[in-house]
Every structure is written in C-alpha cells, then in structure tokens.
Amino acid sequence: MQETVLPAASAPYSTFLYVLIPLLPFLGFLINGLLNKRLSGTVAGALGSATVLGSFLISVYLFLNFQYQYTVKLFDWISVGSMQIPFTYQIDQLSLIMLLLVTGVGFLIHVYSIGYMHHDENVGKFFSFLNLFVFSMLVLVLGANFVILFIGWEGVGLCSYLLIGFWNKHTAFNNAAKKAFIINRVGDLGFLLGIFLIYLTFDSVQYAEVFQKASTMQIGTGVVTAITLLLFVGAMGKSAQLPLYTWLPDAMAGPTPVSALIHAATMVTAGIYMILRANVLFTLAPQTLEVVAIIGAATALFAATIGLAQNDIKKVLAYSTVSQLGYMFLALGVMGYSTSLFHVLTHAFFKALMFLGAGSVIHAMSNEQDMRRMGGLRKALPITFITFLIGCLAIAGIPPFSGFFSKDEILLHAYEHSKVLYAVGLFTAFLTAFYMFRLLFLTFFGEFRGTEEQKHHLHESPASMTLPLIILAILAAVGGFMNAPLVLGRGYLADYLAPLFTYSQRLNPAAFGAEVDHATEYMLIGLSVGAGVLGIILAYVQYVSRGVRPAEDDAQRSAPESVVYHKYYIDELYNALFVRPVMILSNWFYRYVEQGVIDPIVNGFGRVTVGGGRLLRNVQTGSVETYLILMVIGIALILALNSGKF
C-alpha cells in the first residue's frame, strides 16, 4: 500500500491505522456473523462493542494529532482507459469529526444494546449487522472520492434494511424494511446520475480534483446546478426530506438501538455530510441552495406538525428527527455550512439520548410504546427521566443545553438570508418544544395508566443501558459550548472547520464574512428561547395542569387533529399514486405476459426436449444387431449424400 498526500508530503502515520478504523467493525461483523449461534449474547455484545471502541480510540488519536489535510492511497482500484479511480481515504477536519461521531455514539449504542437485546435469540446476528452498519458509515466518511462515498452510501442502505426488518417474523416489520430500501433507491438513482455527470464534466471523481476545477467556474453554471440538484435528490432520500421522508417513521419497526443508530449519528446524516463535502459545487449553484433551504424549512415545519398528534413514543421521536434534519438542510441552504455540522453533532447527542431513553421506557413497560398507556414513570425510572429531561431541554433550545447553541445559529443564518425562512424556523422551534414536552409529560408525569402487571414489573434499566444515557446526557448538556454564539466569543468548531470552505469563501466572500451586530443577535436569542419556553409552558398547562389525554380514536378527534394524526394521509396518497398502479401493472404482466407468453415458450422448450429424449430413447434398445443395422443405414446415407444423388 502506498500513501499520497494533499499537499505533497508524506502521511504522518502508518497506513495500517487508517485501514484499521473501518476494518475493526468489519472483523466484528464477520466473527459475530459466522459464530452467531455459538457465542452468548454477552460475548457477542462485548466483541461488537470492543471493535467500535477500538475504531473510536484510533480516531481520537488521529484527531488529537491532526495538523493538515491529506489523502492516503490504499491501492489502485478502477483503471479503465483514461478513468483512474484509486481507493483512497481523506483525512481532514470533516472526516475526523464524523469519525468521532460515528464511532463514539456508535459505541454507546452498542453497549446499550447488550442490555436491551440480551434476551433475543439472534443477538449475535444483531451485533453483526450493527458492526456492518458502522463499517459502511466509516467507509462513507473516509472515502476521498464520490465512488467510495457511494459504496458506503449503499452499504448503510443495505444495513438499514437488515436492521429495520431484524424481527422478520412480523410482516409489518418486513414491509417497513422494504419501504426504506425502495425509497432510498429512488434517491440513490439521482445521486448516481450526479456522480456520472461529475465525471463527464470534470473527468474525475476525486474530491480534490473536482473541487479545484469547479472553483474556476462561474457561479450559476447550468451543469453545476444540474449536478447539485441530482446530488440533493440523493440527500433527500437518505436524510428523509420532503417528499422522500416517509420511510424514516416506519423505520421504528426495528429494535430501539437501531432507531438511535439510524436516526442520530449515522445514516440520516449522510446526506448532510455529502453536501458539506461538496460545498464548493453547491456554492456555485445558488438556485440549488435556495431549493435546499426551502425544502429544509418545509420539512422541518411539516414533520413538527405531525409530531404534535402522535401517541407512539418512538414515532414522535422519528418525526422529530425528520424535523431536525430539515433544520440542518435549512442551514445548508443559507450557506451556514459549519452551523449545519454543529447541529448534526448536537442532534446526535440529544436524539441518541432520547431514543435510548425511549428504549429504557419500553423495556420497563414490557414493550409498550403507546404514551396513552404510560404516565408517572419518573418515580420508577429516575435516571431515565432525568436524562430524558436533559434531552428535551436540549432539543427545545433552552440554554445552556447543546440544542440552544446550534439552533440559534441556524435561525441567525436564516434571518440574514430570508425573514420568511426565519419565521418558519422560529415557529418550528415553538412546535418542537411543545411536542417534545408533551411526550415528556405524558410519559413521566401524572398517574400510571398501564396495566397492574406492567406496574408490578416497572424498574430502572440495568447499568449497561443507563450508563450510555448518562454519558449522552452530559454531552447533550455541555456539547453546545464547542461553538458558542459570537456574543460569547468565536466558536471553536467554526474556526476548526474553516479550511474546508476555502474555495467556497473565495467564490462568495460576503456569505462568510457577514456578522450581525450584538443587539440583533440578542434579539434573535431572546425570540428563540422565548419560543421554546412558550412551547414548554403550553405543554405543561395542557398535559399536567389540565390533565388532557390524547384521544383514543377518530371519533374523539376534531377534523384537523385527525388529519395530523393520520400524517396528512401522505402514505395513503403515495399508495394510491405509485404502489397500487405498479402492483396492478405487475399483476397484468404476470397474468398476460409471463403466464400467457413467457411460460408457454419456456415450457414448450422443455416439452420439446423431454419429447425428443423419449423419442431418441427408443433407439437405445441394448441390442447389438439393432445398432449394426442402424450403423449400416447411416453409412449408406453418408455415401449416398457424398455421391451427389440426393
């Protein structure tokens, strides 16, 4: 293996270290997969967790000793004519932060899974799939060109299918897995076409070459706009934006640790990562950025309204994820690149915390997920309650918790770009605080509404589950200080990421150099915090003071509430527009083309072959005399043909 560097210098560490980061989880996948039935759940969980921990420690070492950007060439990969695509890894600020995020949060989820999945008969297979998921995500963030990124991109798509449908004895779970897989393929087609167009335009798919050539182009060039729109289609599918978002809420069919892994630190952030990596191309396409901002804001608001009426604790968190992803795309669309990554980090902390907290509740409630059957759990689950409260305060944007800092920055960038987008973002912040504290109050406050058997078995989760909750709660509480507002001093994260956006800053210096005055920033902070506090107060009045409980059926709901509860009937609309026509067409082809044309042809060849065999079998009599007669007849025919008489 050979190392190359950008700029020209020798790579500072052995290539083996870079190979080891994704290799360790891959080894965990192989061992747990091959020895699934032979390893106990504890051993399988420990092995799976240890491999991710090893990758995390190596990532920490590289992060602490990072000095400059470089690539590491592992081997020559695709060589066809003038097309040369080496297998190379990119080591820079973005890849290092994503490595820490994926392996750090991934390790905590693995540890949590040891307690959560210990009773499952296929726990070894579960940890095998988790390790493969982490491996695919690490390949995605380490790749130094779009093709390697696409390999990891497809890998996490495959693993999401395997993990969402892990409990495959349930038809509904299998349908959810297929839905996620198919919808992601729609987005991936756009992404793949974008990669083809990148190669046709720049004669390369290597990040360094593509971005250097792109930086010499004019802003608004049509081909770059087409490329970025196609890439954004891929991001819409993977990161669940309108209209390709419907797979994500259904992904709740998988075990709760899977929900945390998919929704917090890995798969859904892939679209944001890809746009951050290709920021030069998107800076050159302001029309695309406007589309990204509008769809991001629309998704944030749309999903937040659906979250208001859901009763499944995991469904509320799922729509919250879709909404927060919309915030991240809003930040990307208004060129708040580092701000978007900042929210990726803080969201990973508090959303992983809340999903794992929801898993702790479900574990205590004997797999009950309906909040209408919960209530009063804060006394039986004190650690889960306190950590979950921290997560809710963070996502609601209450200072000094992490979500306040990243959400405030997003709203600041939106305010500078468009007052309409800012208003949508601010109203979404209010809705977020309301529905998240609705979840908290319905779950942990009031009287217990479950069965006596559930009440008898209520207990706090084991240490393997509560320890990751505590660590994530600490990160959700203090993680925002990595990038404090300008009024408190320049943020570390923005300075650290600045070299990634060198070309973009040259192309559009105004977007990077603008700073609002402190009075405006104080006003925006006040409005953001005020929206969050108002949402919390209204939720408290509704669900604690007045003791309102969600309706049990549509007869008790108003018409608007029923529409929101049924998620605006989008799934039914998609089913009518796409699924049913495809099924009707498939059935028609099956009946009239396959059974009417293809099957008779195939079966006809079979019948001819069988009939011919039966006919020829008659000449195999076993009699030497018969064979001699046939031989003489054959020789006579050959001689006659050669003589020209026939």
Image (tube, rainbow, N blue to C red):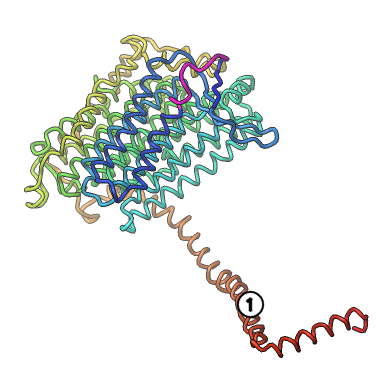
Where on the picture, by quarter, is residue 266?
Answer: top left
Q: Name the residue under label 1.
A: 609
- In the picture, measured across the screen, residue 274 lies left or right of residue 449, that is right
Screen quadrant of the C terminus: bottom right
- SS at circle 1: helix
Screen quadrant of the N terminus: top right
Where on the picture, by quarter, is residue 635?
Answer: bottom right
Give the image location of residue 396, x and y in percent. Answer: 26, 29
Q: Which of 479 and 242 is in front in this view?
A: 479
The reply to whether the magenta stretch includes residue 14 is yes
Q: Which of 490 and 101 is in front in this view?
A: 101
The reply to whether the magenta stretch includes residue 306 is no
- Find the magenta span and give its range: 8-18
Q: Which of 180 and 511 is in front in this view?
A: 180
Give the image location of residue 11, x and y in percent. Answer: 50, 18
In this view, which residue lies farthest toward the right?
Answer: 644
Crowding near the residue tagged with mark 1, few <14, some 14–19, many ≥20 C-alpha atoms within 10 Å: few
Where on the picture, by quarter, is residue 464?
Answer: top left
Q: Residue drawn at (38%, 50%), measured in percent from left and top?
A: 177
Q: Residue drawn at (48%, 62%), measured in percent from left and top?
A: 583
On the question of residue 435 being in view, the answer is no
- In the picture, measured across the screen, residue 89 lies left or right of residue 133, that is right
- The dominant secondary structure in magenta is loop
Amino acid type at mark 1: Thr
Considering only vertical position in the picture, is 502 above or below 133? above
Give the image location of residue 630, x and y in percent. Answer: 75, 86
Q: Residue drawn at (60%, 30%), measured in percent from left and top?
A: 224
Give the image location of residue 525, x and y in percent. Answer: 30, 18
